[in-house]
Amino acid sequence: MQLYNTLSAEERAIMIDDAGKQRLTLSFYAYAKIQDPKKFRDDLFIAWNALDALGRIYVATEGINAQMSIPEENLEAFRATLEVYDFMKGIRLNEAVEHDDHSFLKLTIKVRDKIVADGLNDETFDVTNIGVHLKAKEFNDILDDPNTIVVDFRNHYESEVGHFKGAITPDVETFRESLPIINEQLKDHKDDKNLVMYCTGGIRCEKASAYFKHQGFKNVYQLEGGIINYKKQLEEEGLESKFIGKNFVFDNRLGERITDDIISQCHQCGKPCDNHTNCENDGCHLLFIQCDECKAAMENCCSTECLEIIHMPLVDQVRLRTGKQVGNKVFRKGKSENLKFKHSGELPETALATAQKAADIRQKIKIKKVLLGKAEHYYVKAQVAQFTIENHELNAGDKILISGPTTGDQEMVLEKLVVNGAETQSAKIGDKVTFEVPFRIRLSDKLYKIVN
């Protein structure tokens, strides 16, 4: 029985594009006693793999924590796989604010000691004695109470791009670091203040609220369903958003917009920006904020050193990485002496700029397209884009689509192209092509050929 991925992320992306079906990005969690996490994991993989479900899921003896992408047409069948387990009957599925067919490209289910690394000994306190859940309106109301202290239990790279007004935003890289810091900072307010907390989807606050009640805090509250569910309720009930900016997410999107406020800066030049990227140098992989201009000039790199490395022969790059963690195994989240405009802790309450509205992905007209490759460079002055052709052929006269989270969907007819330095009529797999574009592209953009 297949209990592992047989396709690479690149192959899966092509299959998703060729299928042309809407996918939903969603998350959920549940604390429960699981006697055999390994068997639980294997049973889930078999059931979800059959439904073309993808995502990153952690299971442990204490429960499940899942972020996933599933075909919209399989949603009810997916719910049925959850209903098999008593502790997941009627479970809330937090649907993403902004869906993306490529949010996840593999199904990864890992057995862990805990579903969230909190560093706590659960035997020392009652983990079921949690704080009061607040819906969006209730949360807004309690924030107006002068006796309220609101705490962001996410990490610095999350809160930097978006947070609730007036929130304490600890300068930490992991959830476990924030617990003792907040406990010490608020130790004199256990009786006289409302301790109100929030996180992305609610799972971190579920444990944190029980921990702080155990520490003696009398009035503990948490945002039900986190920022994701808060945004959904705002739209359904027409409420004011007291969250400003973007909600960081742990999938390929790296963020979904809650309000149009941009409250952070490009870490390299200081321009208002809230788009995260990972350094192109696989031996660095630093997560940081980078604007379009710096992305083009630095080719997705965080420093001139990394820029030099990515232009080395691959064999030399591998030699430099020998014996080191690489890619997404490198845990470096936005802190480097090379980043001059990184901010943590005390964060702005007002916008530095306003983001352009992106089209609702669910309203896009479905078009038949095939993936050709991804952007490699954008020459700002010449307004020329460079792509490497990874699949199919490209010819002068083809109708193409350039698509990305910030670029949106831009269609054009390719009048002429330059292949490997020479103007020609066609390009094949492996060729580097350049052509003029009447708009700015980003290095996260993908190139498609429209075939219908």
Image: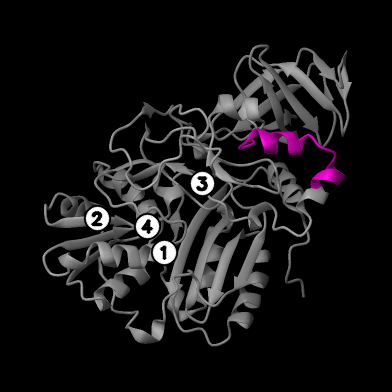
Q: CA distance from mark 2 to mark 4?
A: 11 Å
Q: CA distance from mark 4 to mark 1?
A: 15 Å
Q: Is residue 122 above or below residue 419?
A: below
Density class for disc 3 (Cα within 10 Å; few <14, some 14-19, many ≥20) is: some
User: Is residue 421 highlighted in magenta?
Assistant: no
Give me the disc on residue 335: 3
Give how far across and how far down residue 149 sits, in percent. 20, 56
Please give the residue where the numbered disc 2 appears in the rendered image. 150
Q: Tell me the element at label 1.
A: helix
Query: Mark 2 or mark 3, which is nearer to you?
Result: 3
Please give the residue where the numbered disc 1 appears in the rendered image. 177
Give how far across and how far down residue 212 sits, in percent. 27, 72
Q: Tell me the element at label 2.
A: strand
- The amino acid type, in three-letter code, at marker 3 is Lys
Q: CA distance from mark 1 to mark 2?
A: 17 Å
- The amino acid type, in three-letter code, at marker 1 is Glu
Give how far across and how far down residue 119 sits, in percent. 45, 73
